[in-house]
Amino acid sequence: MNDATEYFNRQAAAYAGASNRFPWSWLRTRERQSVLNVMGPLHRADVLELGCGAGYYTRVLLQEGAAGVWAVDRAEEMLRHLSGDPRITPVQGDAATVRLGRTFPVIAAFGVFEFVDAIDVLRNAAVHADPGAWLVVLFSVQSVPGMLIRWFHASHGVEARLYSLRHFEHAARTAGWQLEASRRAGLFGMAARFRRVPA
Ligand SMILES: C[S@@+](CC[C@H](N)C(=O)[O-])C[C@H]1O[C@@H](n2cnc3c(N)ncnc32)[C@H](O)[C@@H]1O
């Protein structure tokens, strides 16, 4: 188990509640609005979510019309918060290497790229993509507020990565994804939608 997984296992109970309390609730609302602005319609689609955590965006995806969400996270304790909804299939696994044996019309990954090399997750997302599938992401950008996120995670012994949109887009293109829309999200983030193109 690596440092990030140990950290998120320890944080799981507090994490779910913190999303609903100020100041995180304020930040979450702004991030979510940008995610919704770039996202395509869900039309009862099955969605693969990589790095689902305690399910904040899993529930948003369902509210927005997803038929079901296959929710992958490395931290077992985070996945415990997803139990009970039959539309959610929790999967303990690594976003970069997990294999589900099927493909999806929509793939989502929010707040996981800080803890992995983005290209590895983007390549695995492509493995699980239907032809023409779209991918919606949220990642932290290189900026002064972004440095605060790095500092915050470093104070818990976890290294967090920041990206420029150009760097992220380049990694996505290499993995077979074409940028369709992007928007700054809250203080730290960037929300973006990509389309699967033949590699
Ligand atoms: C900042 S949280 C975001 C969780 C959720 N997407 C949200 O927005 O509330 C990051 C999550 O990514 C998970 N994670 C980090 N690296 C991962 C990896 N390589 N594979 C799967 N999950 C990972 C952590 O366990 C944690 O639950």
Image (cartoon, rainbow, N blue to C red):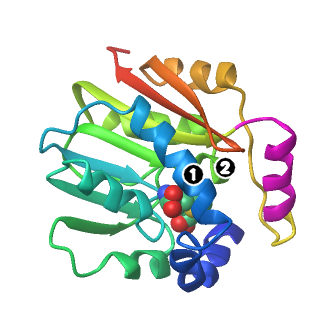
- Quadrant housing the C terminus: top left
- Considering only vertical position in the picture, is 56 above or below 182? below
Q: Mark 1 touching mark 2, by CB under 8 A? A: yes
Residue sitting nearer the eye, 118 or 36: 36
Question: In the rendered image, which quarter is residue 196 located in?
Answer: top left
Mark 1 beta carbon near ligand 1 (under 8 Å) = yes
Q: Main secondary structure of the magenta part?
A: helix
Disc 2 is placed on an element classified as helix
Residue sitting nearer the eye, 170 or 64: 64
Residue at figure coordinates x 32%, y 62% from the top left: 59
**Residue stretch in magenta:** 141-153
- Quadrant housing the N terminus: bottom right
- Check disc 2 and give the amino acid type: Glu
* Position of residue 160 measured from the top left corner of the image (x, y, whole percent): 75, 53
Q: Is residue 128 visible?
A: no
- Considering only vertical position in the picture, is 112 above or below 162? below
- Asked if the magenta segment contains residue 150, the reply would be yes
Query: Taking the image as four quarters, which one is ligand 1 found in?
Result: bottom right
- Considering only vertical position in the picture, is 147 above or below 130? below
Mark 2 beta carbon near ligand 1 (under 8 Å) = yes
Q: Which residue is denoted by mark 2 in the rendering?
A: 114
Name the mark nearer the viewer: 1 or 2: 1
Packing grade of label 2 (10 A; few <14, some 14-19, many >=20) is many
Question: In the rendered image, which quarter is residue 124 located in?
Answer: top left
Question: In the rendered image, which quarter is residue 171 located in?
Answer: top right
* Position of residue 44 measured from the top left corner of the image (x, y, whole percent): 12, 45
Q: Which residue is denoted by mark 1 in the rendering?
A: 111
